[in-house]
Image: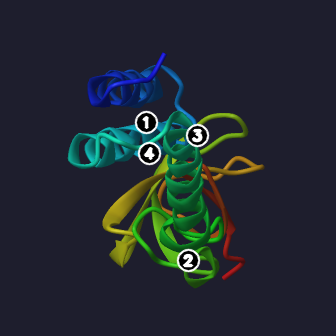
Amino acid sequence: MHPEWWHWFVGGMLLTLAELAVPAFYIIWFGLGALLVGLLLLLAPELSLTTQIVLWIIASSGMLVLWFRIFRPGSERTLSGSASGEVIGETGLLVAPIEPFVKGRVRFQRPLLGADEWSCLADEKIGAGERVKVVAIEGSFLKVARTGV
């Protein structure tokens, strides 16, 4: 069987849609590679099956490498593009009390990572109105500790 251009389009769309079910963000590149091969096959219908598969592997792998090596933000970066090291040590005012395993709220004088108020966690009980400093970023929460001042 010699695949037609629309076979690659359907396969590419299915792989791209499969990315919605599998939140890993790598299946999409294989789907886009299939769409690219379908487009090339539409423009040059005489491509052999071997050439089509090789093109799909090269296109998919190339896009995957570009994403993970060049375009994807590094693991040391936060979502807003500020390095996590720039946030550690910032001081804020606790506006909601904190207890171990219970979230509180901290407000900063200037916006930090795009917001002036953040949910936070701490290893000890800290009352509202106390000054705290950021000691780590844990997911979408800031981990804070008393400033000692």
Residue that badge 1 annotates: 31
Amino acid beneath label 1:
Gly
Whole-angstrom CA distance, mark 3 to mark 4, is: 15 Å
Out of 124 and 62, give the one closest to the viewer.
62
Q: Earlier in the sequence, mark 3 or mark 4?
A: 4
Contact between labelled residues 4 and 1, with CB atoms less than 8 Å apart: yes
Give how far apart the Cα atoms at labels 4 and 2 are: 39 Å
Going from the N terminus, do you reach mark 1 or mark 2 first?
Answer: 1
> How far across and how far down the image is residue 93, in percent?
46, 67
Q: Secondary structure at mark 1?
A: helix
Q: CA distance from mark 3 to mark 1?
A: 18 Å
The amino acid type, in three-letter code, at marker 4 is Gly
Q: Earlier in the sequence, mark 3 or mark 1?
A: 1
On-image quarter of the C terminus: bottom right
**Residue position for label 2:** 87
Residue most extreme to the left: 43
Residue beneath label 3, please?
50
Dot 4: element = helix
